[in-house]
Image (spheres, rainbow, N blue to C red):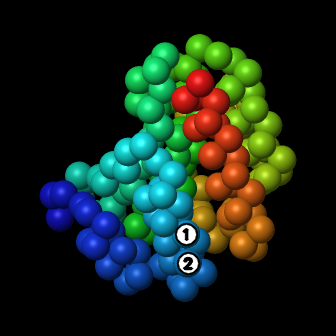
Amino acid sequence: MAKWDKDTFVESLKSECAPHAVNVVMDFIQFAESNSDIIAWGRGEGHGTMTFKCKSEDWGIVPIFHVTSDGKIKFLLNNMRNKVRKREILRDYTLKLESNFMLDFSEELYTADVYFTVMELFVTKHEVDKFMITVKGICARLHQ
């Protein structure tokens, strides 16, 4: 597949992932459809990607996270560190991710954006909801 869209992404997701991962990623797709400024569907081979992007008057279009059709998520913190100059926005996002997932996302330890397995990070619906609230808050701050 050279170009992905929602239908091909969901089809691949359902064939490659366990039902729990499918449900979580479908929640992210619905969340992106109602809350993102731009949803970007991948163009690569092998697996599809969906990127949640937010428009900012100061920094242009800022990607916040992206999920793959093979059940992985990437928090685009390092991309944001290079683009967003307001450190308090980045610090807020980092702290909320760290408290949600009990991981260290400091600049020293998280030097490259990496994929995490959705099923390992999002065990309960509450964790999914907390992440969505975090993303909404970051987008609201970027829109200011």
Q: Residue at x 72, y 72 (%)?
A: 125
Question: Which residue does the numbered mark 1 point to in the structure image?
Answer: 27
**Does residue 96 appear left or right of residue 128 in this picture?**
right
Image point (55%, 20%), residue name: 84
Q: Is residue 72 above or below residue 27?
A: above
Hey, what amino acid is under mark 2? Asn
Asked if residue 123 shows in the view, the reply is no
Quadrant of residue 47 in the image? bottom left
Task: Tell me the element at label 2.
Answer: helix
- Which secondary structure, mark 1? helix
Using the image as rendered, state which of residue 46 and residue 143 is in the foreground. Answer: 143
Closer to the eye: label 1 or 2: 1
Note whether residue 119 is visible: yes
Percent x, y for residue 3? Answer: 18, 57
Q: Residue furthest front?
A: 144
Question: Which mark is on residue 23?
Answer: 2
Residue at (46% x, 21% y) in the render: 57
x and y, in percent, of residue 130 in the image: 74, 57
Question: How many numbered marks does the figure carry?
Answer: 2
Image-based side of 80 in relation to 6, left or right? right
**At 38% across and 83% down in the image, what residue appears?**
15
Q: Pick the residue in front: 128 or 82.
A: 128
Tell me if residue 59 comes above or below residue 48 in the rendering: above
Is label 1 in contact with label 2 (beta carbons under 8 Å)?
A: yes
